[in-house]
Amino acid sequence: MNPSDQRFNDRLFTRIAGLEKQMKEIKTAQPVGAKSVAFIDSIENSFAVAVGANSMWWRDLRFYGITGLLANSFVSELGMRFYIDNDNNENYRLPLGPSLTSGQLKCHAASWQDHHEGVVGEKWYHIPLINGDTAAHTFYCHFILTLPKGAVSS
Amino acid sequence: MSKPKVTKRVQIDAMGISYSETIGNVEILGPGDFESLDTDHLDDKSWNDLKRDIQTGKLDNAKVKKIIKAKQ
């Protein structure tokens, strides 16, 4: 074999090995989708607010003092459940609680996917509360935030 | 492991009275002007009584303030 051909093969194998190493490093550092990222749930929190007949109101949730894995933002998911007039009672849970009356079924908690980042380490969620009934109703809300482990300071 | 601190708060705004219980760094805010009353000093029984009376509409703004202040 011509010695120059052998040197070409050697260089090729060296480059392939280097490429494999780089790919492994990229996969290890992958921030989203990697199983190495642990997530936690915050402790459950709650609030209650009375909304008058045929009225709309809203509440903001402001999570603060939080730093995440992705620069100044953080990845999170907000889990919420709502009850009408009966706190933590599954029979009155929106939207399909079996005991909800026709009037209570006109109550809606909408668009909690509406959220934005605030200042560094801060995230806001907006929750419209709509009462389309002719009587006042109390909205009960329980919520949990899921986010990367270690990202909450509390 | 220490018991996590629960923040108990009563909020008075144009809609009336609402309350919240939160643990950790979260704040619940309403629209427009509102008055936020810190009720952390209430014991569990007083807090549960206060919540029940708010839920059943027994209390107006003045009565809520009076109860919270009386326990301080």
Image (cartoon, rainbow, N blue to C red):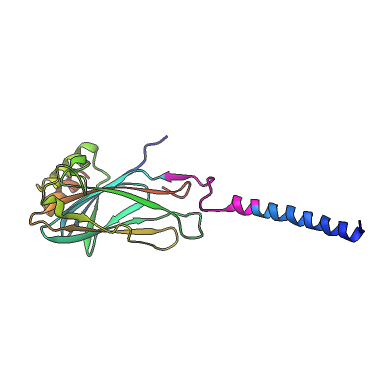
> In the rendered image, which quarter contains the N terminus of chain B?
top left
Q: Residue furthest bottom?
A: B32
| Image coordinates for residue A130, horizontal then vertical, percent | 18, 58
Residue sticking out furthest to the top:
B1
- Whether residue A38 is in magenta: the answer is yes
Position of A26 with respect to A9 (left or right) is left
Residue pushed farthest front? A1
Between residue B57 and residue A34, name the one nearer to us.
A34
Looking at the image, the residue that sits furthest to the left is: A134
Compare residues A87 and B6 and report the one nearer the observer: A87
Check residue A26 for magenta coloring: yes
Q: Is residue B8 visible?
A: no
**Residue located at (13% from left, 44% from top):** B53
B12 or B63, nearer to the observer: B12
Indicate the position of residue A129 as horizontal and vertical percent values.
21, 57
Query: Is A124 placed above or below B51 here?
Result: below
Residue A90: tell me if it is visible.
yes
Give the residue drawn at x 30%, y 49%: A80
As drawn, B3 above or below B26 = above
Percent of width and height locating residue A8? 84, 59
Q: Nearer the viewer, residue A105 or A55?
A: A105
Count of numbered marks: 0
Quarter of the image that includes the C terminus of chain B: top left
Q: Residue at x 59, y 52 (%)?
A: A29
Q: Residue at x 24, y 38 (%)?
A: B43
| Residue A7: image location, x then y, percent | 86, 58
- Residue interval drawn in magenta: A24-40
Asked which quadrant contains residue A128, the reply is: bottom left
